[in-house]
Image: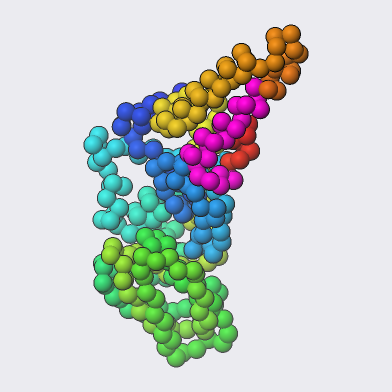
Amino acid sequence: MDEDRTITTFLRAARIGIFDLSWNVLCPGCGSVLDAKATLGAVRREVYECQICAAGHEPTLDELVEVTFTVNHRVRKIDAHTPEILPIWEYYRQILWSTAVDLPDPFNAAIENAILESVELPPGGKAILSLPLPTGTVIVFEPATHASQFLDVRGEPTSARQNLSVLFNPIRAPSGMAQLQPGPLRLMLENRADTRVLPAVWLTGAAVHDLLGKRKPFLTANRLLSAGHARAHCASAPSLHVMASRCGRVGAVAWKSGPSPEAPMADRITTIVQLVRPCAERFLTGLLGRNPRPIAPQARQ
């Protein structure tokens, strides 16, 4: 099937409400979705923090902004329409990790090798997990709130029980680091958010790499906005259509009122570009925010 025609078809279907189009900011390290917006103009933060990788990333259109199409709930209901009731690992698979991650098969076996324990907590819920800590870095991560707690496990093994408390709330606090020794841990978890949380205790190293290390092609924002799909995309982004039509009118006026017809063609084109470019930049600023730095090169083109 021709790729360009397929993308165009999906865009037209999104225009009439068959699919919902989403712009997802991805982490290049673990492949998780850091933020999801209905329009590209809503992707405005300069840096998006990944609490799993403890790193910030600038959302560039050619690498870190993914475009996805999900069937509209009025057409057909699917499990992803109700993420609040998805089983824990289906939530990770369908909501947290992007389509760029090539998850292994069998999936459940790979998960079991990468975690120590997991639990589901309703709003206000509490849980106590007893588990052995291996030497290395362990991460307590929760996908709904994107909260994480890093455990730096080092030193002499101990038989004494260690205690640690982790709270989950709607405020995304920076990742923390706790120093612990190899040995038994009593982990107390409390959910203070107004939705359920799905914390898991993750190992680091080969097991997580085997789970998340493979990538597959995905539809980038840059690919969608390429020349071959510009017209179809304008149907779902009226601001771009307005920008194109108004800039076209500016160019037509410039052609008529610019240098005389006897002037060299290069001078006439230069005058048109000088008049049209500010028009384009004003509309792009309105569409993408006051600081559309990640796509400035493409915008200038």
Colour scheme in the image?
Answer: rainbow
- Can residue 7 be seen? no
* Quadrant where the C terminus is found in the figure: top right
State the image quarter where residue 92 is shown.
bottom left
Q: Quadrant of residue 260?
A: top right
- Corner quadrant of residue 119: bottom left
| Residue 265 position in % (x across, y down) | 73, 14
**From this viewpoint, which residue is outermost toward the top?**
262
Q: Is residue 233 magenta?
A: no
Say if residue 50 shows up in the picture: yes
Residue 89 higher or lower than 261, as above or below: below
Residue 163 vertical position relative to residue 237 in the rendered view, above or below: below
Name the residue nearer the viewer: 234 or 29: 234
User: Residue at position x 57%, y 35% from top?
Assistant: 281
Predominant SS along the magenta part: helix
Q: What residue do we see at 26% from left, 56% from top?
A: 85
User: Does the magenta-highlighted stretch encompass residue 281?
Assistant: yes
Q: Position of residue 32 (x, y in %)?
A: 47, 54
Q: Position of residue 164 (x, y in %)?
A: 41, 82
Give the percent coordinates (x, y) of residue 146: 42, 62
On screen, residue 298 versus residue 94, left or right, reads right
The answer to whether 211 is drawn above or below residue 287 in the figure is: below
Residue sitting at the far right:
264
The residue depicted at 51 percent of the width and 56 percent of the height is: 48
Residue at position x 54%, y 55% from top?
Answer: 47
Q: Answer above or below: position of 91 versus 191.
A: above
Q: Which residues are magenta?
A: 272-294
